[in-house]
């Protein structure tokens, strides 16, 4: 059996905060791409953005699963 992450979040506020961080990372990536910095900096920022977007997706999926479970219990 595969291990699953369990999220304890404050709903939209947490997703909103994560989305803001992701937006900031994407803006910074755009700025750096125009300046031709070292590729490792861009790779590091891209990795961070991908991790953050996965975290947002995980939270949204967990919330949807919880909502569906609640509907099925009724």
Image: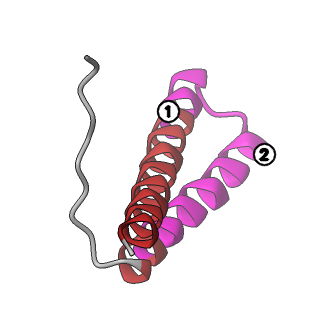
Q: Quadrant of residue 71?
A: bottom left
Which image quadrant: the N terminus? top left
Picture layout, residue 71 above or below residue 31: below
Q: Where does the magenta region start and end?
A: 17-45
Looking at marks 1 and 2 on the same chain, the residue that comes earlier in the sequence is marked by 2
How packed mark 2 is, by other alpha carbons closer than 10 Å (few <14, some 14-19, many 20 or more), is few
Predominant SS of the magenta segment: helix
* Image coordinates for residue 35, horizontal then vertical, percent: 72, 43
The residue mark sitting in front, 1 or 2, is 1
Instruction: Please give left or right for residue 45 compared with residue 3 in the image.
Output: right
Q: Is residue 74 magenta?
A: no
Q: Residue at x 47, y 31 (%)?
A: 44
Dot label at residue 47: 1
Instruction: Please give left or right for residue 12 compared with residue 8 in the image.
Output: right
* Image coordinates for residue 10, horizontal then vertical, percent: 28, 78
Q: Secondary structure at mark 2?
A: helix
Residue farthest toward the top in the current orientation of the protein: 1
Residue, disc 2: 34
Instruction: Please give left or right for residue 62 compared with residue 43 in the image.
Output: left
Residue situated in front as seen by the camera: 63 or 10: 63
How packed mark 1 is, by other alpha carbons closer than 10 Å (few <14, some 14-19, many 20 or more), is few
* Image coordinates for residue 49, horizontal then vertical, percent: 53, 45
Residue situated in front as seen by the camera: 32 or 18: 18
Q: How was the colour assigned to the protein in this rendering?
A: secondary structure
Residue farthest toward the right in the current orientation of the protein: 34
Residue farthest toward the front in the current orientation of the protein: 74
């Amino acid at each position: 059996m595969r291990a699953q992450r369990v999220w304890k979040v404050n709903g939209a506020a947490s997703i909103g905060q994560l989305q803001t961080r992701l937006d900031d990372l994407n803006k910074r990536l755009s700025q750096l791409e125009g300046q031709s910095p070292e590729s490792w900096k861009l790779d590091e920022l891209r990795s961070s953005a991908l991790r953050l977007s996965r975290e947002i997706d995980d939270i949204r999926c967990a919330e949807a699963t919880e909502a569906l479970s609640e509907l099925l219990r009724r």
